[in-house]
Image (cartoon, rainbow, N blue to C red):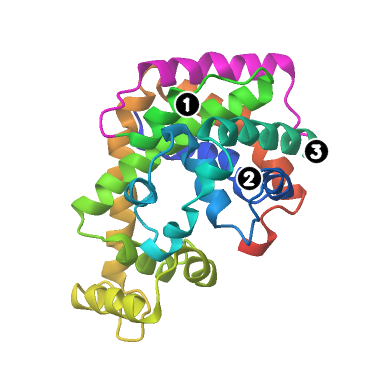
């Protein structure tokens, strides 16, 4: 696999998946289960995203999600009392279906079928060893809505790369807070959003910054060094290398075609203003 093709389809997968955490339908449906949504992260976020794993304790969610602080994840205690994981998963599909319909994603039945023919072979052929969230999502029965079903297959592969990325972060000695600090310093993630959602306090953020300064990845003022920029990009390259075998069933051409086919999903949500707060 050409790593440029791996990166292209990985980015397309990620941006086609992400709307689920930011659309108003998520807050509305969570409220029906008795859980209030406050911002882009909170108990409902963790319930929706971890539901495929079953009624696991918050500590398991923390382990699977990696870059969140314990204080950010622990408030999800009680979400399985409000509704079972199966209910949360079913409602998640309702959220996806409603949101996809609202923004008017421009995918024909033939395009959805073609995308499924490509993505299904990747999902079926994937090695799920060490891929906790991907394996959990692959075990979920697909919804009847064709577009929502395509989105769920996208979710499996989004989480597969995410699981692979965590292995790479750990291998590069980037702990849960450290990876947020370097991610924001390189401009890949807004600092305000990272600080508001991931739950790391000032002391923890400063300690992570100091560790990265000692490695030569950050300057004393927290800005990224040239070495830090190179090192952070190498983490992405190593993740791409980990993912190359995943896409082998459809090859470079198939991966790029899939990326093209699912692009209208992100286009529609971007046009609807879904991601304005993150720009």
Residue 67 vertical placement versus 243 (above, below):
below
Q: Nearer the viewer, mark 1 or mark 3?
A: 3
**Residue at position x 44%, y 15% in the image:** 121
Which is nearer the N-term, disc 3 or disc 2? 2
**Residue at position x 49%, y 37% in the image:** 51
As drawn, is 206 to the left or to the right of 76? left
What separation in Å lies between label 1 and label 3 (alpha carbons)? 28 Å
Which is nearer the N-term, disc 1 or disc 3? 3
* Residue that sits furthest to the front in the current view: 81
Which label is found at residue 255? 1
Q: Which residue is mark 2?
A: 19
Q: Could one spot residue 264 in this view of the protein? A: no
Magenta range: 104-130
- Circle 3: element type: helix
Is 114 a magenta residue? yes
How many C-alpha atoms fall within 10 Å of the one at disc 1: few (<14), some, or many (≥20)? many
What separation in Å lies between label 2 and label 1 (alpha carbons)? 21 Å
């Amino acid at each position: 696999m050409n790593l440029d093709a791996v990166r292209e389809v990985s980015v397309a997968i990620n941006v086609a998946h992400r709307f689920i955490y930011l659309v108003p339908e998520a807050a509305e449906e969570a409220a029906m289960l008795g859980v209030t949504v406050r911002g882009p992260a909170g108990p409902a976020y963790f319930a929706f995203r971890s539901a495929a794993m079953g009624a696991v304790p918050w500590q398991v969610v923390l382990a699977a999600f990696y870059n969140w602080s314990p204080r950010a994840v622990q408030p999800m205690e009680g979400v399985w009392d409000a509704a079972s994981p199966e209910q949360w998963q079913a409602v998640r599909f309702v959220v996806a279906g409603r949101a996809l319909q609202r923004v008017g994603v421009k995918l024909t039945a033939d395009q959805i079928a073609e995308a499924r023919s490509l993505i299904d072979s990747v999902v079926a052929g994937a090695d799920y060893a060490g891929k906790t969230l991907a394996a959990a999502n692959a075990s979920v029965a697909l919804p009847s809505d064709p577009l929502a079903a395509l989105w769920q297959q996208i979710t499996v592969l989004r989480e597969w790369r995410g699981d692979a990325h965590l292995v790479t972060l750990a291998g590069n000695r980037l702990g849960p807070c450290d990876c947020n600090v370097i991610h924001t310093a390189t401009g890949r993630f807004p600092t305000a959003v990272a600080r508001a959602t991931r739950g790391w306090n000032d002391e923890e953020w400063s300690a992570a910054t100091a560790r990265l300064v000692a490695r030569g990845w950050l300057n004393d003022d927290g800005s990224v060094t040239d070495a830090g920029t190179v090192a952070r990009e190498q983490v992405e390259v190593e993740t791409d290398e980990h993912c190359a075998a995943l896409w082998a069933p459809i090859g470079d051409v198939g991966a790029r075609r899939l990326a093209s086919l699912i692009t209208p999903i992100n286009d529609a949500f971007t046009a609807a203003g879904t991601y304005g707060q993150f720009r």
